[in-house]
Amino acid sequence: MHIEPGIVTGAKIALSYATAAGATAYSAKLIWESLRDRGAVSLIARATMATLAVLVFFELLPHMSVGVSEVHLIMGSTLLLMLGTAPAAIGLAAGLLIQGTLLSPFDLPQYGMNLTTLLVPLFGLHALTKNVIAKGTAYVDLSYKQALAMSATYQGGIVAWVAFWAFYGQGFGAENIASVGTFGAAYMTVLLLEPLVDLAVLAGAKAMRGLENSGLVTPRLYAA
């Protein structure tokens, strides 16, 4: 997943360092809370699974360049529902860094932008779980409507941030507006698939109750 090189250049790219630093600071807060509540072994295990999953999502699942960025099946809501917000944040950050370091070095200058674009919508999704999912409801009992709301929040956040970086870097010319619009329209097609994937994964988790006390999934998966 990357903002196309050249979209934001020069001194403007400094803003991406600031937004990425803010996202990293909030991630650190969530990581500390996860360490306090579940311990280091559980967090490391879940973060490792999230990182491997992100690399699969980025590199092996279908993806294509459209307009100002790439369209990916990132499955941010799936990672949060199964593993928790902190491991998902670590996985997204680490997977993005590994991809840029080993596979796509031309993406590294855009790392701050890409990190912000992936993590801030995840934090919005984290907040949404407290409002969309009623207290007393475990993740394995989510409805399609709830899964759709979560997916729309994450994917919509990604599109909004990509649009921000594109307009910030290149202005509001007709060509840039059209490029952003093309990307946004293509990316929203992910909404046709991701909620179904979430529900399928949750159904599988529901049938595997042995995971409940394993430390390999988020506690909210089975217990509200």
Image: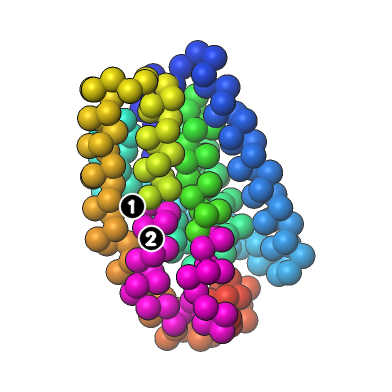
Q: Main secondary structure of the magenta part?
A: helix
Instruction: Give the amino acid type for the residue marked by disc 1 in the picture.
Output: Leu
| Category of crowding for the residue at label 2, using alpha-carbon neighbours closer than 10 angstroms: few (below 14), some (14–19), many (at least 20) | many
Residue wearing tag 2: 151
| Category of crowding for the residue at label 1, using alpha-carbon neighbours closer than 10 angstroms: few (below 14), some (14–19), many (at least 20) | many
Disc 1 from disc 2: Cα separation: 11 Å
Residue 92 location, x and y as percent?
51, 48
Q: Nearer the viewer, mark 1 or mark 2?
A: 2
Residue 153 is drawn in which quadrant?
A: bottom left
Residue 17 location, x and y as percent?
60, 28
Image quarter hosting the N terminus: top left
Residue occupying the point 33% across, 34% down: 69
Which disc number belongs to residue 73?
A: 1
Is disc 2 placed on a helix, strand or loop?
A: helix
Name the residue furthest top: 10
Assess whether mark 2 and mark 1 are in contact (beta carbons under 8 angstroms). Answer: no
Residue 60 location, x and y as percent?
32, 49
Mark with earlier residue (1, 2): 1
